[in-house]
C-alpha cells in the first residue's frame, strides 16, 4: 500500500500524525490532571488522560506492526552513515517510548489501586493484574513521567532533524511524511 518508494504510505502518514496530535493533547490533559484544584476535575482529566494514553498505546502497536510489514523508504543519496544510524535509532526509541510510556502510566495507576475508569466513559479498561502498593505506584509513575520527558526531547530532535533535511540539506525527508508537501525534484 505504498504510493511510491520515496514516500511513506498513507497509513503510515495517518498513524504518524494522529499519534503526534494525541501525544500533544495527552500532555495537556496530564498537566490539567496534576494541576486540578477540585478532585472531581482531577478525576475527569485523569479519565481523559488514561483514555488517550491507551489509544496512543493501541495505535503505536498498530503502527509498529505496519512498520514491520512496510519498510521505511530509502534514505536520501549522500546521507552520512552516522545520520542514518541516528535517524533509525531515533525512530526505534520513539516506538519504545510510545509503547512504554502508556504501559508505565497504566501500571502506575493499577499498582496504586485507582478505581477502573472506562475509556471515553464507555469501553471497559481494567487495571493491570500487578502487585499493588504506594511505593510501586510512585516508582512506576516516576518512570512514566521520565519517559514522557524523554518523548519531548526525542520529539524536539526529530523535528529539528526534519527541518534540517528540508531547509539545509534540501532533500525529500520531510516531504515524504507530510501529506500535502510535494517531494523536491
Image (tube, grey):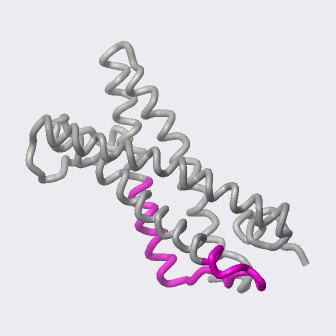
130 or 10: nearer the viewer: 130
- 151 vs 173, left or right, is left
51 or 135: nearer the viewer: 135
- 169 vs 86, left or right, is right
- 163 vs 11, left or right, is right
**Residue furthest out toward the right:** 185
Residue visible at 32% across and 19% down in the picture: 40
Magenta stretch holds residue 90: no
**Residue furthest out toward the top:** 37
Q: Main secondary structure of the magenta part?
A: helix
Indicate whether 118 appears above or below 35: below
Magenta stretch holds residue 68: yes
Residue visible at 88% across and 73% down in the picture: 184
141 or 157: nearer the viewer: 157
Q: Residue 50 is drawn in which quadrant?
A: top left
Please state the horizontal and vertical placement of residue 84, each as a whole percent of the image: 63, 77
Please state the horizontal and vertical placement of residue 177, each as a whole percent of the image: 70, 67
Magenta residues span 56-84
- 55 vs 79, left or right, is left
Residue visible at 64% across and 66% down in the picture: 13
Amino acid at each position: 500500500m505504498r504510493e511510491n518508494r520515496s514516500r511513506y504510505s498513507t497509513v503510515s502518514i495517518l498513524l504518524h500524525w494522529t499519534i503526534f496530535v494525541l501525544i500533544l493533547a495527552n500532555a495537556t490533559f496530564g498537566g490539567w490532571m496534576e494541576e486540578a484544584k477540585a478532585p472531581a476535575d482531577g478525576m475527569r482529566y485523569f479519565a481523559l488522560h488514561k483514555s488517550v494514553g491507551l489509544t496512543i498505546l493501541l495505535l503505536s502497536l498498530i503502527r509498529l506492526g505496519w512498520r514491520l510489514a512496510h519498510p521505511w523508504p530509502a534514505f536520501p543519496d549522500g546521507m552520512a552513515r552516522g545520520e542514518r544510524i541516528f535517524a533509525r535509532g531515533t525512530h526505534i526509541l520513539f516506538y519504545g517510548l510510545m509503547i512504554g510510556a502508556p504501559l508505565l502510566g497504566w501500571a502506575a495507576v493499577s499498582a496504586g489501586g485507582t478505581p477502573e475508569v472506562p475509556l471515553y466513559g464507555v469501553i471497559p479498561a481494567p487495571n493491570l493484574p500487578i502487585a499493588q502498593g504506594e511505593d510501586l505506584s510512585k516508582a512506576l509513575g516516576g518512570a512514566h513521567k521520565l519517559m514522557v520527558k524523554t518523548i519531548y526531547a526525542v520529539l524536539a530532535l526529530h523535528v529539528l532533524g526534519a527541518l534540517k533535511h528540508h531547509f539545509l540539506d534540501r532533500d525529500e525527508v520531510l516531504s515524504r511524511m507530510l501529506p500535502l508537501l510535494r517531494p523536491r525534484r
